[in-house]
Image (spheres, grey):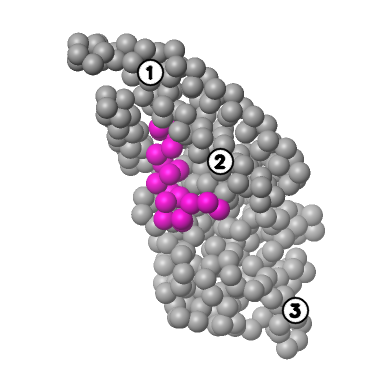
Amino acid sequence: MAGALKIADPPGFAHEIHNYALLPERLVNPAALILPWLEVVTGLALFLGVWRRSAAAIFAVLLVVFIGALSINLGRGRPVDCGCFGTSSVPRTGAERLAEMKVAIGRDVLLLLLAGQILWAVPRPSRRGSAPLVR
Amino acid sequence: MRLIWQAVALLTLAVVCAAASNAMAGRERRLAWKGAAITEGSQRSASTPAAGSAAPVSAASSQAGKGSFSPHPDKPYVEISGGETSQLHGRGDVPFLDARRTSVYREGHIAGARPLSVWESDIDDKVKAFFAEGHDPSGPIVVYCSGGECEDSHTLAQKLYLAGFDAVFVYKDGFPDWQRRGLPVHSGDRP
């Protein structure tokens, strides 16, 4: 869902990534193009039960990155639009943005716990190589 | 090990989908894989300030007399107020460039302004085309975006400066201020 909204407007998402002031500029556009699709691909894999451990691991890494990016800017006192669900066209004050960043961090921490639960609950593949590819 | 290979496969699938999606996207929604909206460094001269590092100077305070918008080849742009912008608009021969997204431009823009969104893939082509139109490199050009924390106009100003324009003025309070002042606004694709 979140990935699909970003896929609809890559330039808008690139702008949001730029506002975080964390990535070198030459990596902003590739990140804006690939990240939303990575969210969609891992989300579909989790939903369909395909390669769940790998999808959950990617999901967890993405969430750690998102939490880190939001936390760094919160620490800087730099209000940014989360960009979590695409581009926002609603003008907000800096204080409103900072409050939304805290909410987004809380939400991402909960999702990270969920990803951890999947990694813990889904059994590891058999070492004999006879385990099915799709679990 | 299997987990790593599967993760790499998912990542590869995401990259392939991103490439296909971007190739099929329309002009306004496409992104260049290489390069970025923001110009890194300067190719104009060693002494040129990098993007975002230019010290903004008020036109009114930097010019010999109010209403004189002379070239400033030593810096990419000079910030101007709504009053100064209105003054330049009134001359009728000063190009106005809108750095916001084209979709936002269509909803409303300064009358006569042209869309040059810095976040769309064809921005460099548009800047080159603008230069090729034969505008006076020392003549004033006004760029704007949404005011406040919006930096798109400064990014566009930097690109214009690197293209060879010496008198780029950034309307620092942008389109919201223009609307508040009740100055002429157009909507749609028409400048």
- Tell us which disc is closer to us: 3 or 2: 2
Residues B28 and A102: in front is A102
B108 drawn magenta:
no
Work out how far the residue at label 3 is from the one at label 1, CA to CA, in angstroms.
Answer: 62 Å
Residue plotted at (45% across, 28% down): A59
The residue at the far bottom in this view is: B64
Percent of width and height locating residue B118: 51, 56
Which label was assigned to residue A128?
none
Q: Amino acid at mark 2?
A: Gly
Which label was assigned to residue A52?
1
Q: Is residue A123 left or right of residue B50?
A: left
Work out how far the residue at label 3 is from the one at label 2, CA to CA, in angstroms.
Answer: 43 Å
Work out how far the residue at label 1 is from the one at label 2, CA to CA, in angstroms.
Answer: 24 Å
**Image quadrant in which you'd find residue B59:** bottom right
Residue B134 makes an appearance in the image = no
- Element type where label 3 sits in the image: helix
State the residue position of label 2: A68
Q: Which residues are magenta?
A: A21-39
Percent of width and height locating residue B151: 61, 58
- Element type where label 2 sits in the image: helix
Callout 3: residue from which chain? B
Residues A102 and B60: in front is A102
A29 drawn magenta:
yes
Residue plotted at (66% across, 72% down): B56
Residue B125 makes an appearance in the image = yes
State the residue position of label 3: B60
Callout 1: residue from which chain? A
Percent of width and height locating residue B142: 62, 68
Residue plotted at (60% across, 46% down): A72
